[in-house]
Image (cartoon, rainbow, N blue to C red):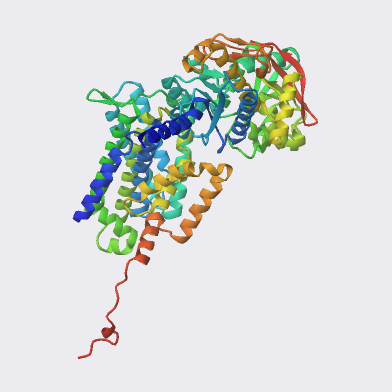
Amino acid sequence: MTRSRITLLALAIAALVVAPLGQGNYIIYTLCSWLVFSIAAMGLNLTLGYAGQVSLAQAGFMGIGAYITALMTLNGVHWSLAAFISIVSSFAVGLALGYPALRVQHHFLAFVTLAFNTLLFLVLRNEEEITGGSFGLVGMPRPSFFGISTDGNLPFYYFSLVCFLLSTGVLWWILRSPWGRAFKALRENPIRAESLGLKIRRQTLLAFAIGSAFGGLAGAMQTPLVQFIEPGSFALIHSLKILLMVVVGGSGFFFGPMLGAAVVILLPELLRFTEGYYLIIYAALVIVLMVYSPNGLIGLGQKLLEKVRPKHEARHDLKQGVSL
Amino acid sequence: MINKLVYATALVTTLAAAPAMAELKVGSIVELSGPGAAAGTNFRDGVKMGFEEINDAGGVLNEQIAVTEYDSQTDPQVSRAMVQKAIDDGVYAIMGTVFSSSTVVNMLVARQAGIPQFTGSEAPSITSMNNPYIFRTAFGSQKGVPKMAKYMADEMKVKKVAIVWANTEFGKGGHTSFLKEAENHGFEIVADIPTEQAQSDFSADIVKLKGAQADAAFVYVTEEESARFLREARKQGVTIPLVGETTLIGHKVIELAGEAANGAMGHVGLTPDANIPAMTEMVEKFKAKFNYTPDHNAIKGYTAAYALKCVTEMVGEPDSQAIAEKMHGLTLKAADCPGVLMDVSWDETGEMSRESFFVQVENGKQVVKAVLPPN
C-alpha cells in the first residue's frame, strides 16, 4: 500500500467519524442504514464480485442474523454474543445451502438462492410462536458497551461504524490471503485455477459462506437499529436491492458496495422532489449506467479517468521498429 | 457603517425568523410508493385537503399549518428514517402511516420525542402497546369485526361461513377476531383459506370456496387483492354473499373490480356514501380537487387534520405533550368541530369509537343498509 493510499484511507475514516457531528437524527439514522447495508453488500461482493457466483439470498441471511439477534437480545443476552451466534449461524447455513447449491453455477445458483430466500420468508412468517409471524418482533434493546449505552442515535452510529470498520478490515485481510487470491483466480479462469491445484468447489463454497456471514452481521445490526423486524424486511425484493447495490457500485471492486449502498439508499431521497416520477428516473438511471458501464460506478469512474489521463505515447522513432 | 450593518443584520434575522414563527409544522408520513401506495395516497390527499381548508379559514390559533410529506415506501426501515426526519424538521404532530408495520416502528420514535401521531392503521396490536402518543383515525379491526359478525348472525341469519384472509399482520388480526366472534355466534367455519399479499391469481381459492358450501364468505384481504378476488369470484359464478370490511368494498376496490364488485357487502367505519351532509360535502370537494372518489383512508386523513386543529385550540397552544394528554378520554362532537364529520371519542389507549355502517355495493356505489352503534 502506497503512502498516498494510506493518507486517503485515513482521511476517509476521519470523514466517517466527523460525518454525523452536528447532524439531525434523520441524517445519522440514514448513515447507520448505509453502514449496515454496506456490510451486507460487501459480503455479496465477495460472493459475486470476487468468486463470480450470483446469490439472491443475501437478505435471507440478514434475516437469519436479525431474527437470532432479536430473539436473543429480547431474552436478555448481550448483543455481542447474539451477533457472534448470528454470524456463525449464517456461515453454517451458507455452508449447508451452498454445498448442494454450488453444484450448479451462475443463474441456476441464482434460482436456488431465490428459492431459499422465499422459503426463509415463509418460515419466518408462518412459525408464529417463535418469530412473531407477520406481526414481527418489536422493542429490541440497543446494546451498551462498558457502561456506555447506544440508545442515542450518535452513539449507535459510532457503534455501527466500529462494526463496519472491523468487517472492512476482515474483508481486506481475506482478499489478500491465499483464499482471496484463489477466489479471484476462480472468477477469472476456473479451469486454469483447477489445473493449478485449487479445489474449485471448496473455494466457491467458502466464498459463499463468508459472504453469508457478512449478511448475518448486517442483520444483527439491523435489529437494534430499527428495533422492529418483520419477515417482509427480508423478502426477495431486499435481496435484489442488495444485488443492485453491488452491481451499481461496481462488483469486484473493494469500495464498490459501499458506493452502491450509498446510491441505492440516498438516491431515492435526492430524487424525492420529482414526486411520482422518481422511481421511473431512478430505474432509467440504473439502466443507462448498466448499458454504458457494466462495471458500475467505480468502473465508470475509471473509464472517465482513462479518457482524461494523458496516454502513454509510443516513441515516434520506434514506430518503424528498432533497426541496428 | 456599523449602524447600517447592525440594522441590516437585524432586518435579515427578522425576515428569516418571521416565517418560522408564523407556521406550525405537521408531518404527513405515508405510503406513497410500494404496496401501500393506493391507501397511502388517499390518506395523504385527505390530510392535504383538511389542512388547506383549515389554512384558508385562518389556520390554527391564527397560525398557518405547513404540512410536509414523507414517503415511507411501505418499508418499516425507511419509515423510521422518515419519522426521524419529520421530528428533526420540528413537527408538532404526525399524520400516518396507514400500514401497521410502519406505524409500529414510527410509534417508538414518536414516543421518544413525545410527538402525537394520528395513524390510519387498524391492526389491533397498535393500541395495546401502552404508547401514550398514538391515536387512531378509525377504530381497530378488533372492534369492526364483532359489529359485522353480529349483523351477519342477526340480520343475515348465517350459519356456515368460509373465511378468506390475507396472511399478513393486517389479515391475521381480522382472522383471529372473526374466529372468536364465530364462536360467540355459533358459526360453523367450513373453509379457512389464507392468501398472499400481492397475490394475483385467486382461481384456486375461489374453487375451494365454491366447494365449501358456505352460507356466506368473510373476505379479509387488502384493496387490490380484493378487487382481483371479486373479479375471479364473478368469473366463476360465486353466488353466496361476500362479506368483508372496508377493504372489500372501498371505492378503490369498486373502481378496480368494476361490475364484479356489485353485491359485495361489508362493514365500513367511514363511507363517502353515508347519508351525512358533512361527509357528502367533503366528498364532493375532494372529487373536484383530486379528480377521484375518496375512500375511507382519505376521510381518515381529513378528519385527523381537523381533530388536531380542534384539540390544539382546546389546549390553547401547539404543545405536543399537552395535546396527547388532552386526547385521552376526549369526545369531539361534530357539532363543535364540524371537520371530524361524525362524533368521535378516544380512550386511554388511543383507541377510538364512532358510529359505523353496514353497506352493500349496488351499481358501483356503496348503499348503506344499516347504521351500527359505536362499541
B245 vs A182, left or right, is right
B320 vs A259, left or right, is right
Q: Is residue B65 visible?
A: yes
**Residue A309, position as x, y percentages in the image:** 33, 66
Name which residue lies at 50% across and 53% down.
A285
Q: Is residue B236 visible?
A: no
Quarter of the view holding residue A34: top left
Q: Is residue B266 above or below residue A7?
A: above
Q: Is residue A249 above or below residue A16?
A: below
B279 vs B26, left or right, is right
Q: Looking at the image, which is closer to me, A95 or B308? A: B308
In the displayed orientation, state which residue is furthest to the top: B329
**Residue B145, position as x, y percentages in the image:** 63, 18
**Residue A155, position as x, y percentages in the image:** 30, 29
In the displayed orientation, state which residue is furthest to the right: B363
Location of the N terminus of chain B by quadrant is: top left
**Residue A184, position as x, y percentages in the image:** 30, 57
Q: Looking at the image, which is closer to me, A266 or B6? A: B6
In the displayed orientation, state which residue is furthest to the bottom: A324
Location of the C terminus of chain B by quadrant is: top right
Q: Looking at the image, which is closer to me, A269 or A207? A: A269
Quarter of the view holding residue A16: top left
Name which residue lies at 40% across and 33% down.
B9
